Image (cartoon, helix red, strand yellow):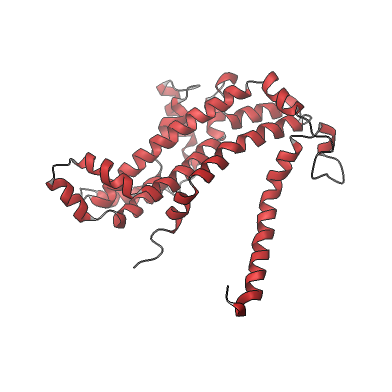
């Protein structure tokens, strides 16, 4: 650290630490409240730590409600959607980046235009299509319509334009590789940073998805976690916040675990292409 910039560096670090504390405070309050009795959560002045930590909120969550089933439902839907969307978006991005075909530019312009369309605009048409296909109250409606996202296609296309040398593809063709084999054996391994970044984004998007699952799912056993927690909110009539906080605290674990496990790829995916040699 240069000595002449030491005051500025200290100020910057203090600013970042304050920002981190501000961002983490709601998460800390959620976890802390999950171990408190209901009457203590809204005490004034508020307490950071529970006076007498209890596990009753967690026991009640699993004994009275199918919280474990909701957890499994969310993991299955999120994992399947993440894998499929990463595969199809990378496949489409590879095509846009490395092949010249009719209507390539107009089609990519449609993808870019779709980036600015909010989900609420397509909600009613998607709902009508789902009913006609007979997918209401099924996981097909949660996975299939979102297997290819405009953002994912755009991200993968931008990454693959420069990261996959055309010479490598030509050499693979001379050796007898099919185009799909080139995608699997060369494009995917060379695009690992972008794949990791998009996988985290897609996982968080699916894990937190609430509006669409709330519309298409109408059986308690099929709920995903956001919809299940919302149903608890209605059952308790704003009284049992400790149980709600316990459910919310457990819901955070997969997202944090995934980010810690794939942090290296996520950071690489954000910074790649920023520096040109």
Q: Position of residue 129 (x, y in %)?
A: 42, 28
Q: Position of residue 168 (x, y in %)?
A: 21, 52
The answer to whether residue 229 shows anywhere in this view is yes
Tell me what residue is drawn at x 65 percent, y 30 percent.
Answer: 230
Q: Quadrant of residue 244?
A: top right
The answer to whether residue 219 shows anywhere in this view is no
Q: How many marks?
A: 0
Q: In front: 252, or 122?
A: 252
Quadrant into which the C terminus falls: bottom left
Q: Is residue 95 left or right of residue 276?
A: left
Q: In front: 246, or 104?
A: 246
Q: Position of residue 221 (x, y in %)?
A: 57, 19
Q: Is residue 266 above or below residue 8?
A: above
Q: Is residue 18 above or below residue 265?
A: below
Q: In front: 86, or 2?
A: 2
Q: In front: 19, or 124?
A: 19
Q: Position of residue 5 (x, y in %)?
A: 61, 77
Q: Is residue 264 above or below residue 217?
A: below
Looking at the image, the residue that sits furthest to the right is 44
Tell me what residue is drawn at x 60 percent, y 20 percent.
Answer: 220
Q: Is residue 141 left or right of residue 24?
A: left
Quadrant into which the N terminus falls: bottom right
Looking at the image, the residue that sits furthest to the bottom is 4
Q: Quadrant of residue 60?
A: top right
């Amino acid at each position: 650290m240069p000595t002449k910039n030491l005051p500025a560096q200290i100020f910057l670090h203090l600013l970042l630490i304050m920002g981190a504390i501000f961002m983490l405070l709601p998460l800390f309050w959620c976890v802390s409240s999950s171990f408190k009795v209901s009457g203590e959560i809204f005490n004034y002045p508020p307490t950071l730590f529970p006076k007498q930590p209890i596990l009753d909120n967690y026991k009640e969550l699993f004994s009275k409600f199918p919280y474990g089933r909701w957890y499994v439902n969310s993991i299955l839907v999120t994992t399947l959607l993440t894998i499929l969307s990463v595969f199809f978006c990378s496949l489409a991005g590879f095509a846009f980046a490395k092949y010249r075909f009719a209507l390539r530019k107009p089609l990519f312009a449609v993808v870019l235009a779709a980036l600015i369309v909010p989900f609420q605009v397509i909600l009613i048409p998607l709902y009508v299509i789902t009913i006609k296909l007979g997918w209401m109250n099924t996981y097909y409606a949660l996975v299939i319509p979102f297997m290819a996202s405009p953002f994912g296609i755009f991200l993968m296309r931008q990454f693959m334009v420069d990261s996959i040398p055309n010479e490598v593809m030509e050499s693979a063709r001379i050796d007898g590789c099919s185009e799909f084999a080139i995608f699997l054996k060369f494009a995917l391994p060379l695009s690992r940073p972008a794949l990791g970044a998009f996988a985290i984004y897609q996982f968080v998007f699916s894990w937190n998805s609430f509006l669409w699952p709330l519309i298409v799912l109408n059986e308690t056993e099929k709920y995903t976690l956001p919809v299940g927690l919302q149903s608890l909110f209605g059952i308790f009539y704003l009284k049992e916040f400790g149980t709600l906080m316990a459910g919310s605290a457990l819901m955070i674990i997969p997202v944090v675990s995934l980010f810690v496990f794939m942090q290296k790829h996520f950071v690489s995916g954000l910074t790649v292409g920023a520096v040109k040699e």
